Amino acid sequence: MLSRRWIHVAAALVLPGAAILIGFALAGEIAWSRALGAVAVLVVLAALVSHRRLASLDGFETHLFGTAAAPLPAAGLSADDYIAALERLEIAAAERAAHEKTRTQAAEAVIDAIPDPLLVIENARQVVLANTAARALFGPAAGRELAAVLRDPALIAAIETAAPGDPAQEVEFALAGAVERIFAGHVVALPETPGAAPRVLVAFADRTAVKRADRVRADFVANVSHELRTPLASLQGFIETLRGPARDDAAARDRFLGIMNDQAMRMGRLVADLLSLSRIEQDEHTPPAERVAVAKILRSVADALLPTARAKAMTIVLESAPDLPPVVGDVDQLTQVFQNLIDNAIKYGRPETPVTVTAKVIARPPGHLRLPAQVVAVSIADRGEGIAREHLPRLTERFYRIDTGRSRALGGTGLGLAIVKHIVNRHRGALLVDSELGRGSTFTVCLAPVGSDPAGAGQPGR
Ligand code: ADP
């Protein structure tokens, strides 16, 4: 590099003098030997002078484009040299900026693709970056004051105290909304950049489902223990009495044994319901594939429950459409669904009133996109006290009862509708509840007829 440039510069310096000397020699003004000797001296001088200058230019270039450690040469350069070097510098800077932009865009795309919300906060005061998930959660957060986006004092304190190099802090907080959600915020200070404001990254993990599952599980264990403890305590009490004070009292013994039998039956029903719930849950993700004639099941369930209905002077009216198509289902599970619903209608219906069971094809109810356009709908209507609106959303929760004492007195376990819901879910059907206080309730089960094409089929996430 140096040698070519050196030859060019040295030649430029030598050429005019050499031309004059050769001119004089040609004209015979000076001897050729002298002229050539002078040219040789000129070449040596030009080489020496240009070498110093070019070494300096070379050092300048190495400083600009070579290793960062190369020192800036002290000697002066020509204006052209500087211009050429600066042009190269500008080209290199533009290339570096374009490269930097591509890298920033790639980093932003990666941050946006992260499914958890992320925020970057500057000076512990202003949000400067929010990824797609954060925008969905907090709205357009970038550019807003931190206090307008996050309000939890513990989370804000963690952001304010975060220092580079510190381990991430985790703060759990509730986010108010139509449905309260629980999040864990991981707060970590980003490495310091000289001249830039301190930045803190907050990554949010949605803990709502885990918390809810924990609570449901804890509630469930507490409920089961409670449900079993009451009859168990009563059995133990009667055993004590029969062993002691009532040992020889035949009338009391008969009465107590009757109660003990009821309590043991209640425990048996509870255990049976718990087992069937756990079995249904296990295969809830594999839909059934049998071809089931609903009208036949309804007839056999109605026959089986006739004595229970008669005990309350009630009737079961069965109205099945003659051309009812078969549905895709599991006979035993659908039998359990209709048994639980008709049993409830008898339990909660007023004495001497009918329970009406209708089965017909209807158009898919609005909002139930998972169902095919036409469904087989089985409605069980009672004339009981009805259910207040506020109870409807929670009715299918395990052990949820409107009146626990009444349910127990009627032999209920509080699991009947939970079982119905899980079976209907496995059948990819729908359970609708319609009720009017003082008039009665109608529970409707919608099922897919054989051969129907579910509207949601093929759509991911359904
Ligand atoms: P239970 O064994 O208590 O009947 P379910 O899960 O079958 O349990 O029902 C849950 C609760 O829903 C019942 O305790 C009752 O309060 C209410 N319920 C269910 N079916 C009816 C109905 N047909 N009429 C009025 N209330 C009902």
Image: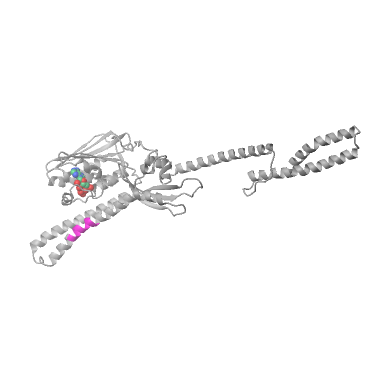
Q: Is residue 170 above or below residue 27?
A: below
Q: Quadrant of the C terminus?
A: top left
Q: Is residue 124 above or below residue 358?
A: below
How many numbered discs, if any?
0
Between 399 and 431, the residue placed more toward the observer is: 399
Place residue 151 in its image quadrant: top left
Would residue 328 be seen by someone viewing this image from the given angle? yes
Going by the image, does 331 lie left or right of 12?
A: left
Picture coordinates of residue 125 (x, y %)?
40, 44
Is 231 a magenta residue? yes
Between 275 and 223, the residue placed more toward the observer is: 223
Q: Quadrant of the N terminus?
A: top right
Q: Is residue 171 above or below residue 6?
A: below
Q: Residue at x 23, y 44 (%)?
A: 338
Q: Which residues are magenta?
A: 225-233
Going by the image, does 238 lie left or right of 426?
A: left
Would residue 1 be seen by someone viewing this image from the given angle? no
Q: Residue at x 33, y 51 (%)?
A: 211
Picture coordinates of residue 402 (x, y %)?
19, 47
Main secondary structure along the magenta-highlighted residues = helix
Going by the image, does 140 lie left or right of 9?
A: left
- Visual colour scheme: one colour
Picture coordinates of residue 92 (x, y %)?
61, 40
Is 341 a magenta residue? no
Between 302 and 442, the residue placed more toward the observer is: 442
Between 460 and 265, the residue placed more toward the observer is: 460
Picture coordinates of residue 277 (x, y %)?
28, 50
